[in-house]
Amino acid sequence: MKEIKDIFSKQADTYATFRPESPDELYDFLLKDIGEFESAWDVGTGNGQVAGKLAEYFKTVYATDISQKQLDNAVQKPNIIYRLERAEQTSLPDNSVDLITVAQAIHWFDFEAFYKEVNRVAKPGALIAAWTYTLLQIDEGPTDELINNIYTNILGPYWDKERKIVDEQYQTIPFPFEELACPVFYNKVSWSIEQLIGYLNTWSSAGHFKAKEGYSPITLIEAELRQLWKEGEIKEVIFPIFMRPGKVKK
């Protein structure tokens, strides 16, 4: 089985603060195809953003992650059951869940082993959905150019190989389910420059860079970014979201 990569434990608190959530339109799309709302499984839950949303609809939400520090910072609701477990090997009962969600995490998994686990725990006809957001967009101008430059040229060597799967919008992953047509979603947030910088520092590549070089790579562009933001200005930041939903057939 693929080796576990626990990349986000060191920045679990900032991850919980700055990572953007998925838009309501995405959940509306997902939930319209659910037959029952007894239980859902959020895989690679991180700080529980998706689990917290699913808890509004499902009787029970199981949320698993390999990072205890992430779970320590997770959203708390009485019907969410958090478990420190890898995606490919859980304690969930056979044929027990109606929906399986994987937000910004499936590229870290051992696909063959994970899909075997999905088939074990999913009820017949359950829905599985994996989604990822790609590089943010702000102004189609100097701000985007700065961020694109650090993303590609400065941090390019510091991204894990799995990042390529995200850049490919999950279109290259195996997905052995009855796939459903799905639109592109857009998460639009209104951010200050501090929120943008906080988010950029949650990039896994930024963590790798800091571990090697001893400082945050975002400081290399921070002064220029601040010049593009007026004092107290709030700008719209857009995250394109690409999702692959499918029915689990047994």
Image (spheres, rainbow, N blue to C red):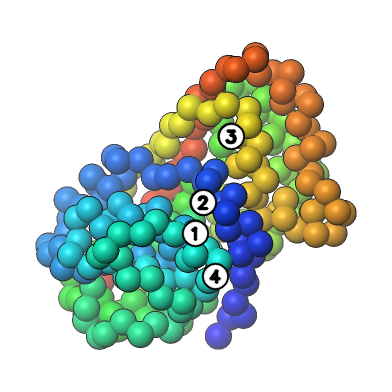
**Residue drawn at (79%, 26%) of the image:** 223
Q: Nearer the viewer, residue 15 or 37?
A: 15
Q: Secondary structure at mark 4?
A: loop
State the separation of the CA atoms marked 3 and 4. 24 Å
- In the image, taking residue 97 as reference, residue 37 lies left or right, namely left
Q: Are marks 3 and 4 in contact (CB under 8 Å)?
A: no
Question: Which label's residue is closer to the chain start, 2 or 3?
Answer: 2
Looking at this rendering, what residue extends furthest in the top direction?
230
Q: Are marks 2 and 3 in contact (CB under 8 Å)?
A: no
Question: Which label's residue is closer to the chain start, 2 or 4?
Answer: 2
**Residue drawn at (43%, 63%) of the image:** 45
What residue is pinned by disc 1?
Answer: 73
> x%, y% of residue 21?
42, 45
**Residue drawn at (22%, 68%) of the image:** 60
Question: Which label's residue is closer to the chain start, 1 or 4?
Answer: 4
* Kind of residue at badge 1: Asn
Q: Quadrant of residue 158?
A: bottom right
Tell which tag, 1 or 4, sits nearer the viewer: 1
> x%, y% of residue 199?
60, 42
What residue is pinned by disc 3?
Answer: 195
What residue is pinned by disc 4?
Answer: 67
> x%, y% of residue 66?
52, 73
State the separation of the CA atoms marked 1 and 3. 18 Å
* Kind of residue at badge 3: Gln
What residue is pinned by disc 2?
Answer: 16
Q: Secondary structure at mark 1?
A: loop
Q: Are marks 2 and 1 in contact (CB under 8 Å)?
A: yes
Question: Which label's residue is closer to the chain start, 3 or 4?
Answer: 4
